[in-house]
Image: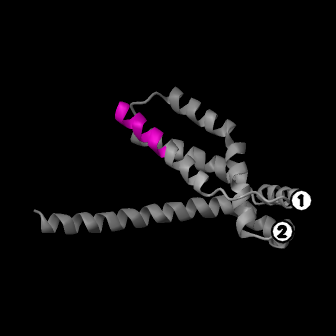
Amino acid sequence: MKKHLVGLALTLTLFGTLSLWAEAPATDDPGKRADIKKLLELTGTRQLALQAIDQMIGQFKQSMPQIPAEFWKDAAAEMRMQIDDLLDLQLPVYEKHLSHEDIKGLIKFYESPVGKKFVKATPAIQMECMQAGQKWGQKIGQKIAKKLQERNP
């Protein structure tokens, strides 16, 4: 059990470290920051992050079935409570890579009917792409395992 908890801690640390690497200097333009927050809201970033948390917890549950369900429930609740911190870490990334005009253009797109449709479809698209990626990974993994077995019977 300790081994699995260490694995969980390392995964969460890596997740947090990747978010910190993404940090960039903040802009002095509060209007740009407000528009980035609006863009994140329009794109459903919060919901996608919450979906990612649920998927990650689900994977941990499967790989560590000996850990009580209550632990996973508490871990998911803690991560969900901290979601605003994660979203705040994304603001400087958008500031770094996109101009204020870019952000305004994206807002215009995501407020359009096709933009709204895309946001609504994104969770399903991502889920199906993830499932396709898992199938691909399994297929490749089996090929690699077979080659290893052939080399080292």
Residue on which the image places disc 2: 100
Q: Quadrant of residue 36?
A: bottom right
State if disc 2 and disc 1 touch (CB < 8 Å).
Answer: yes
Three-letter residue code for mark 2: His
Q: Main secondary structure of the magenta part?
A: helix
State the extent of the magenta-drawn residues as a range: 1-11
Q: Secondary structure at mark 1?
A: helix
Q: Position of residue 124 (x, y in %)?
A: 64, 60
At 71% from the left and 58% from the top, the residue drawn is 25
Color scheme of the displayed model: one colour
The amino acid pointed to by label 1 is Gly
The quadrant of the picture occupied by the C terminus is: bottom left
Return the residue at label 1. Answer: 31
Q: Nearer the viewer, residue 10 or 121?
A: 10
Residue at 14 percent of width and 68 percent of height: 150
Residue 10 colored in magenta in the image: yes
Residue 54 spot, x, y in % from top left:
58, 44
Answer above or below: position of 102 versus 84: below
Residue 81: in magenta span: no
| Residue 133 in sight from this viewpoint | yes
- Residue at point 84%, 66% (across, down): 107
> From mark 1 to mark 2, how far is it between C-alphas?
8 Å
